[in-house]
Amino acid sequence: MPPPAFGVAIPSYGPFSDGSTLTPIAQAAEDLGYADAWFADHVVIPGYAAEISGTSWLEPLACCLVGLGATRTLRFGTDVLVAPYRNPVLVAKMAASADRLSGGRLTLGLGTGYIHGEFEALGAPDYARRGQVTDEYIQVLRCLFESSGACSFAGEFVQFDDIHFDPTPLQEPLPLWVGGNRNPAQRRAAALGDGWHPLFPTPEAYQEGRDHIVSLRERGTDGFTFSYSCPGTRVLAPGEPLPEIGGYESIPDLPDEYHYAPPMPRTEQARPRFIGTPDQLVEDLEAFVEAGVEHFTLRFFTDSEAMTCDAFIDQMRRFAEEVIPQLE
């Protein structure tokens, strides 16, 4: 089995949303040998969620375009783009253009979203049916990306007839990775995706989800990537104490929609996975590789005032030099 690939979730929110850190982090990720870089998606944050999610976010497709222009080999992706927020025909045009201009270096991670007030502010389709909307929007992307000549689509949420979509992406196909942990997301990944990119399940839950997807994939898994969107990641020096970190489950009076996220995965000794010494991180990674993970998107800490651009890059460097070689 080949060693896993590693990507980096570049923070594009809070103190990192002024735009000054994106390019140096992306260039450092490329220089350090990471496979790809990823950006999260929020457009607006309703007031009731402001203290939980923050209010300052850069748009992920715009971030991908800037990153692609600042690098030569690094791939970029969305972790994950909320499909119902944007007209899928326009997303298809933006993605195909970015893929052509970058020499084929874009991956679209796609999911259903979860913040009810954000859907309302954007006038997105029915929140309660966002799963069905996401299914159809992915089908629209595939229809346009795979078109040759005029194409038509007659869905419940999207309809067009006799339109031409050119140029199509350089990649055939442009990878569409499906986010989400639960059975509907696994079904969506199996039926419509080129990869599965869930949010930090345990090794056991990942193995179960992977097996479910494999059982549903009539055409096999060649060209399909089993990815993993990591929780907060930090390389500790020997003797350095564990930082305090908690998932959404540690927030009092958490709005119902935030319960989509699973608890932080932990070892039997209660250590948060992906936070530890290099040897401990290798143990964590080996557990997930054993469960079938082929690609990790690492989410280095950005919630401390001390987490500057330089500190973030130092974490990337330490992981690349002290952890990754042990898995090769």
Image: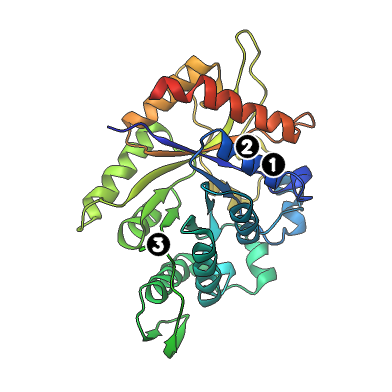
Task: Tell whether label 2 touches label 1 (CB within 8 Å).
Answer: yes
Q: Nearer the viewer, residue 162 or 35?
A: 35
Mark 3–mark 2 distance (CA, rounded to whole Å): 25 Å
Query: Which residue reaches farthest top?
Result: 239
Point out which mark residue 28 bears: 2
Q: Position of residue 193 (x, y in %)?
A: 36, 59
**Residue to which mark 1 is pinned:** 24
**Element at badge 3?**
loop
Query: How far is disc 3 from disc 1 in space, using C-alphas?
Result: 26 Å
Q: Residue at x 43, y 73 (%)?
A: 168
Helix, strand or loop at label 1? It is helix
Amino acid under disc 2: Ala
Q: Is residue 252 above or below residue 118?
A: above
| Mark nearer the N terminus (3 vs 1) | 1
- Residue 45 in the image: state x and y as whole percent: 72, 58
List the residue tagged with mark 3.
171
**Quadrant in the picture for the C terminus:** top left
**In this orientation, does residue 131 appear?**
yes
Question: Which quadrant of the structure image shows residue 218?
Answer: bottom left
Residue at 56%, 33% (x, y): give it: 32
Horizontal side of residue 152 vs 62, given as left or right: left
38 left or right of 287 in image:
right
- Relative to 166, 287 lies left or right: left
